[in-house]
């Protein structure tokens, strides 16, 4: 294809005209005004050299050039500004540009005079491996370096120098690379001392320099100056990381780790509420990354001083009402039972697990995620009753677990009071059984010894005697007792669990439940016990909060009732021997009392 000199001269003039703009954005706008974006679409017209030349020129300046770090190494990328799902792009990827288009780029390098134009065109020809590749890289790097002095915007300067350095490194031009690094360091110092606060520019210049094997000698002092200049703990933290990359000895790294922790402790001193808690949590994370016991102790001590009232959290409450007729209808399974024994079974099983079935929970969580778009984009932090951060989901699995726990906790707001009324109605309708009768009843369970049955009986009596707080604290440990007894009855082996979890300690409730789940524990009831007792991803976490003394206020009848339901469910279970199977599993509970 024959491209006329006059037309190429005109196109080169437009490029040089665009280079007179104050910044890169305005330069590209200038070119788009000369060659509208609509002309960039489609393939080159090999039959019309004038149209093809205009399109190839527009393509050349439509690519995005960026410097990225992958696998610890920095490199340049030239990518189309628009990539479509079908694999096509606009402009086409450099490797897909026809030779005629590359010829236009090569001819234009002879006619443009601006550094803006030379840098881009030689860079494209280097990436396309056209002609003298080494020469293209050197000329592109030199032109980018010169262009950085012409632009007025900080980001344009930084991008030009970073790209220049990568090109110089790509072809082994050490002297040119050293010159460009000196210019980058000078730019960083200008940004630090500028009245404009541009820490992003400073970091974008210093990050690649810190990765260099032989950076400018003054790099460390420039990083130190940036640490002093910027107040943001986020910026200062990253600057410390840059220094850690260059630390020569373990002692230097230890000092830098301590400084990194102190940055967040100092930042927390100037904040209140959740921002203070967040900074202290980060300080503890940094201390744990350092692995220094003294740092961990100092950061943990500061975080533990946070109290719930310091967080500035706001509580929202809502209430609902049902008619007397509806209420009595809901009480009917217990009120109409033949005796207190049947009534207790109805209390536990008439309405299923308090958190609802897993199918219903998943459906509610999916619907909530669908309509709560902004919430899904935000970072979530769950705080415990002690006011300390308890859980912050990182993976998609953790986020999904939090969504499920949140829906289950919401369900408990209505089902827990219902269960409390049902348990009260057992005594109202059938009288309070004696401790001896209750003990005899609970002794029928395959997992309950006479002593355990007697202890469970006294918990129920405390509830009916008007002491739900005492009932709550005494019934909660029975859940773990029954779970452990069930694991033992399945020959799962507590000692084996100890070796897998924490040697010298009994396995926790979560480990026991996980084992039972593997052996066939109903998923809905598994989640019911987990979310009520000890789900770090949300829920009521009653058992853990009670055990660690974080619940000061009386949890009331609803809190006691959901724990009683968990106990009743586990009490009905026992090992199930599969035909021809050496391993036993957990049977599905039918809501029937164990046969005597």
Image (spheres, rainbow, N blue to C red):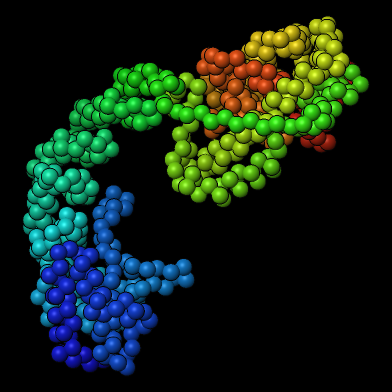
Q: Percent x, y for residue 193?
A: 10, 43
Q: Percent x, y for residue 385?
A: 50, 22
Closer to the camera in the image, 24 or 316: 316
Residue sticking out furthest to the right: 338
How many marks can you see? Answer: 0
Q: Quadrant of the C terminus?
A: top right
| Residue at the image point whose x is 58% and y is 36% from the top | 406
Q: Percent x, y for residue 302?
A: 34, 20
| Residue at the image point whose x is 54% and y is 14% from the top | 552
- Look at the picture and state if 19 lies above or below 178: below
Q: Is residue 591 left or right of residue 127?
A: right
Tell me if I can see residue 168 in this picture. no
| Residue at the image point whose x is 24% and y is 70% from the top | 29
Quarter holding residue 244: top left
Q: Quadrant of the N terminus?
A: bottom left
Q: Percent x, y for residue 559?
A: 65, 21
Closer to the camera in the image, 520 or 90: 90
Quarter holding residue 297: top left
Tell me if I can see residue 365 in this picture. yes
| Residue at the image point whose x is 27% and y is 27% from the top | 270
Q: Is residue 30 left or right of residue 421?
A: left
Q: Is residue 409 left or right of residue 294?
A: right
Closer to the camera in the image, 262 or 344: 344
Q: Is residue 553 left or right of residue 118?
A: right
Quarter holding residue 554: top right
- Look at the picture and state if 481 lies above or below 410: above
């Amino acid at each position: 294809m024959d491209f006329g000199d006059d037309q190429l001269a005109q196109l080169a003039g437009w490029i040089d005209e665009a280079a007179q703009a104050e910044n890169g954005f305005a330069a590209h706008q200038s070119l788009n005004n000369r060659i509208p974006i609509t002309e960039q679409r489609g393939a080159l017209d090999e039959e019309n050299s004038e149209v093809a030349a205009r399109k190839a020129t527009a393509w050349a300046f439509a690519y995005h050039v960026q410097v990225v770090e992958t696998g610890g190494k920095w490199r340049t990328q030239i990518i189309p500004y628009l990539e479509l799902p079908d694999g096509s792009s606009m402009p086409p990827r450099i490797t897909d540009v026809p030779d005629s288009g590359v010829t236009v780029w090569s001819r234009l390098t002879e006619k443009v005079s601006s550094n803006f134009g030379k840098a881009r065109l030689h860079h494209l020809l280097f990436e396309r491996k056209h002609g003298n590749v080494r020469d293209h890289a050197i000329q592109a790097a030199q032109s980018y370096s010169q262009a950085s002095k012409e632009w007025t915007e900080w980001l344009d300067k930084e991008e030009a120098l970073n790209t220049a350095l990568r090109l110089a490194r790509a072809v082994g031009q050490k002297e040119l690379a050293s010159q460009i690094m000196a210019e980058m360091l000078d730019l960083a110092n200008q940004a630090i001392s500028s009245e404009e606060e541009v820490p992003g520019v400073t970091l974008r210049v210093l990050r690649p320099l810190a990765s260099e094997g032989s950076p400018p000698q003054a790099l460390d002092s420039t990083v130190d100056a940036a640490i002093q200049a910027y107040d943001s703990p986020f910026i200062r933290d990253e600057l410390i990381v840059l220094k850690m990359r260059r630390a020569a000895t373990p002692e230097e790294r230890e000092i830098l780790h301590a400084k990194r922790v102190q940055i967040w402790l100092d930042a927390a001193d100037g904040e209140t509420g959740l921002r203070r808690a967040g900074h202290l949590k980060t300080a503890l994370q940094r201390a744990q990354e350092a692995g220094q016991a003294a740092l961990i102790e100092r950061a943990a001590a500061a975080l533990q001083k946070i109290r719930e009232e310091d967080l500035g959290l706001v509580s929202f409450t809502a209430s609902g009402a049902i008619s007397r007729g509806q209420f009595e209808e809901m009480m009917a399974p217990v009120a109409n039972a033949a005796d207190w024994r049947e009534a207790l079974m109805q209390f536990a099983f008439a309405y299923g697990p308090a958190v609802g079935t897993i199918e219903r929970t998943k459906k509610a969580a999916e619907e909530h995620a669908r309509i709560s778009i902004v919430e899904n984009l935000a970072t979530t932090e769950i705080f415990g009753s002690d006011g300390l951060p308890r859980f912050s989901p990182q993976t998609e699995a953790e986020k999904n677990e939090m969504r499920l726990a949140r829906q289950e906790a919401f369900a408990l707001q209505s089902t827990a009071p219902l269960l409390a009324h049902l348990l009260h109605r057992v005594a109202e309708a059938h009288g309070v059984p004696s401790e001896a009768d209750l003990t005899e009843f609970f002794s029928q369970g395959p997992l309950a010894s006479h002593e355990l049955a007697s202890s469970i009986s006294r918990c129920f009596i405390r509830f009916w005697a008007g002491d739900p707080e005492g009932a709550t604290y005494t019934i909660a440990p029975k859940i773990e007792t029954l779970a452990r007894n069930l694991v033992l009855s399945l020959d799962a082996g507590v000692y084996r669990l100890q070796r897998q979890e924490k040697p010298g300690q009994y396995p926790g409730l979560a480990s026991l439940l996980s084992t039972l789940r593997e052996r066939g524990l109903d998923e809905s009831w598994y989640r019911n016990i987990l979310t009520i007792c000890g789900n770090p991803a949300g829920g009521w976490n009653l058992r853990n909060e009670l055990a660690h003394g974080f619940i000061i206020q009386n949890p009331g009848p609803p809190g006691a009732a959901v724990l009683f339901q968990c106990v009743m469910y586990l009490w009905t279970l026992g090992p199930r021997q599969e035909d021809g199977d050496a391993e036993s599993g957990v049977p599905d509970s039918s809501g029937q009392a164990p046969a005597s």
